[in-house]
Image: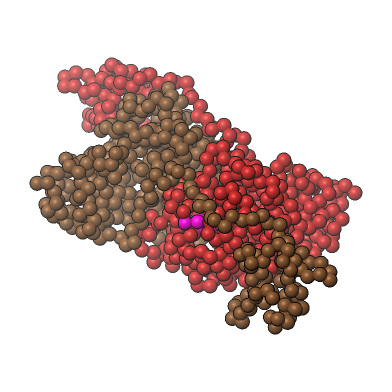
Chain colours: A red, B brown
Amino acid sequence: MLDICLEQENPLSWPLQIYRQIRIAIIGGHLRDGDSLPSAKELARHLAVSEDSVGAAYEWMSTEGLLECRINAPARIRTGVREVHRTRQPVVPLGFWADLPKPPLRLNAAPEYDFRAGVPDTRIFPMDTWLRLLAEQMTTMPPQLLIYEDPRGRADLRREIAVRLHRSRELQVRATDVLVTNGSQQAVHLAARVLLRPGDRVAVENPGYPPPRQMFTSLGAEPVGVRVDSEGLVVDEIPDDCRLVYVTPAHQFPLGMPMSLRRKLDLLAWARRRSAVIVEDDYDTELKFTERPLEPLHSLCPDGQVIYVGSFSKVLLPMLRLGFLVAPPELMPALAKAKYLTDVGTPSVEQAALARFLAEGGFADHLRGLHEEYGARRGLLIDILARDFGDVLTLVPSEAGLHVTARAEYDMWPLVQAARRAGIWLYSLGDFTDPPNFAHGLLFGYGAMRAEAIESGLRKLREIFHQKGRK
Amino acid sequence: MLDICLEQENPLSWPLQIYRQIRIAIIGGHLRDGDSLPSAKELARHLAVSEDSVGAAYEWMSTEGLLECRINAPARIRTGVREVHRTRQPVVPLGFWADLPKPPLRLNAAPEYDFRAGVPDTRIFPMDTWLRLLAEQMTTMPPQLLIYEDPRGRADLRREIAVRLHRSRELQVRATDVLVTNGSQQAVHLAARVLLRPGDRVAVENPGYPPPRQMFTSLGAEPVGVRVDSEGLVVDEIPDDCRLVYVTPAHQFPLGMPMSLRRKLDLLAWARRRSAVIVEDDYDTELKFTERPLEPLHSLCPDGQVIYVGSFSKVLLPMLRLGFLVAPPELMPALAKAKYLTDVGTPSVEQAALARFLAEGGFADHLRGLHEEYGARRGLLIDILARDFGDVLTLVPSEAGLHVTARAEYDMWPLVQAARRAGIWLYSLGDFTDPPNFAHGLLFGYGAMRAEAIESGLRKLREIFHQKGRK
């Protein structure tokens, strides 16, 4: 007799339990093609359930193509399934994925002193306003927009971004030049997807921001690190065959200095000669602490060659994942398709809320507050670094963003490790160079800490320097 | 004298206006290398501004590497920038992007009768609960989680999804097997990114869901349409060299019938023999209208070979963009890297809200309500189709989801066009076949319309059939 055992306490119905156990017996090889099953009546009596319960299970088996039922004959297993190799074939990802580094570890708790570059102050985020805007937009949005939006993003947000870029960054763009993304990394990814073939070479800054570089590798392209000097990327050293150049001209990551206008003009001329595309990541220039114009490459070459990438991660919250790109019209249809095929679109309610925030002027007010607060922290940080760390560190001049970088005479990694053990979280310049540690220095973010924390954190760091540093 | 014209009503400061006009003159070729500028004193007198204003502009020009200033000599333009080719090089995307179809048009207004497949009822969405959960999570979330989350998604959400999958779909999975995505398309995209090389062949259903197929093409892979019969994908016709198979076994899109268990076992055996990966898109099976188990392929082969993809688009809202995948452990590190390099991570507050909604039981309650409502609409729709359209349409049996499909004897496209003009929005089966229209039929979604609308919509459609249809 078929070995079936029904459980009273099992939430599955009798038919489902019977069906499930026959299925397991077939998959496990205990029931094979040609084996006959007892009649529904017999099995029902044996299991002390109704004949209907067994009948339902048999019917499902038959519907599933696993049971042959004939009148006046026992039902027979008839799968026709060819032999399954029982040994499991491990599924392996493409080889290069193993070589790419793991994503950075998320911290389970905020460090006592958080000098990480690019981390904004979540306490300054206008939480109440944002929640009000979300609720307003969600409850008033026409139903069809809660289904699927334009993959390029909402028209109102794209318009507000275009207006904002004109005001703050001298960009001459229309709403149709803007595509909303889930943060700036996605913007760079989309640009790469529509432009790069496996084997294509891509110039990246060295030192530079690792995720785009790794992403290029993950697409089979070949990133080439190009040296950076005090004026920014050394254009003369870009290999001729690069199809794309990824740069951070306004606030070079990680060093912090802006690219000089001369170098920008040189880079644009290079790109025109080579028919290459420049991806300009303007990730934190909404926070500019100088009157000196840090013209985006895009503003110098509005009619092509430059894809401009921006983000709300630094001025709002990283985890909103709201960013955008500005691209020449001939790339936009391909970028819209790439966005659609990658993730259909960016969540619409959040887009609508951001559009309102920009339109109502709340964003501009918020930004004024950020400027004042971050400007004060930045000034304090720079003063203390000059006063107390001048023997070891030399500040790289910068004019924008959420961090400053200082060069050092020797490897900072042992100090960084000691600092982390003491609750001070900061990056070494060597974290962003290829090969690692070819340049010595430290990054000091001032986004996540109030003035008092900057003071006491640097005091504590100074002590660690005394204990650990080469004297 | 240098041609500079200051504007009183321009919001830019005098130094910025002066700087900007010199810059424009250089870029425009009106000032060339070696040209000298008037002294700051002279220019200041000429423009009737202070000498400091001109001095600041000159200093910026010098900082930007465009001006050579020497004592007792006029400042000279000195850019060193090589000639820029003025003719613009158009930037072109890779060729195949032009061949891919445009994303489907977003409707500007909801159609009067919306029979589109896969469109849920936004009015059933528990808006108040969702907004409460968002507000709770956002205001109580530890600051570091508003910065960057684990790219695989929040641990609490992954745990809740694993529990839910066990309960509703018999999946034996742990939280670490789950990766949260921005909807199911992104899940399929990530799978493709870690597994497919350009030129790899991918089996897709024909008829089938177009976006994954197009996405495979956009990665340089080669999708191969495989025939679907009443038991689902015809496994015998999958080309031997396919590295990946994309299927919708529980509710084949667009036809609607489930894949038979026999066929599932056959497909799994095929994948084991060929070391291929199956991507199982279980996009709407939370809405199952039968006791018959529609076992996911993953539940039959829990130890590898299957990547299971799910989505909350149909049971919550598409525009939340919340989905997930379940993958074998050996693929998870590569998938996490791919997610990180693609868009860093899915917004965390929405993840936290969904985790609470699942944990609090609100989701299960909501789902019960959906079952009742959609079940009633589905029953009504099927009854009317059988009663009033039996002469033209033959229903494909299905057991789940948000739409039913009916086969027809002749091409439905002219009828679909006439219906759309009359405010009835529905898809033709030919929209999802390759070549287009090789199969005749219609899809009837019942997600977006209440019972009365279904009745009057079908009545109106019947009239159009009378006018337009072959009699």
The answer to whether residue B316 is left or right of residue B83 is left
Rendering coords of residue B23 (x, y %) = 65, 67
Residue A67 visible at all:
yes
The answer to whether residue A382 is left or right of residue A101 is right
Q: Residue at x 90, y 49 (%)?
A: A471
Rendering coords of residue B176 (x, y %) = 53, 39
Front residue of this view, candidates B77 and A377: B77
Q: Residue at x 71, y 57 (%)?
A: B80
Magenta residue span: A323-329
Quarter assignment of residue B320: bottom left
Quarter assignment of residue A31: top left
The answer to whether residue B226 is left or right of residue B143 is left
Total labels: the figure holds: 0
Rendering coords of residue B185 (x, y %) = 43, 45
Front residue of this view, candidates B75 and A208: B75
Q: Is residue A421 above or below residue A86?
A: below
Residue B158 visible at all:
no
In the displayed orientation, state which residue is furthest to the left.
B471
Rendering coords of residue B364 (x, y %) = 39, 49
Q: Is residue A91 above or below residue A466?
A: above
The answer to whether residue A394 is left or right of residue A237 is right
Q: Residue at x 85, y 47 (%)?
A: A468
Q: Is residue A63 magenta?
A: no
Q: Residue at x 84, y 51 (%)?
A: A465
Front residue of this view, candidates B418 and A383: B418
In the displayed orientation, state which residue is furthest to the top.
A34
Q: Is residue A328 magenta?
A: yes
Quadrant occupied by the N terminus of chain B: bottom right
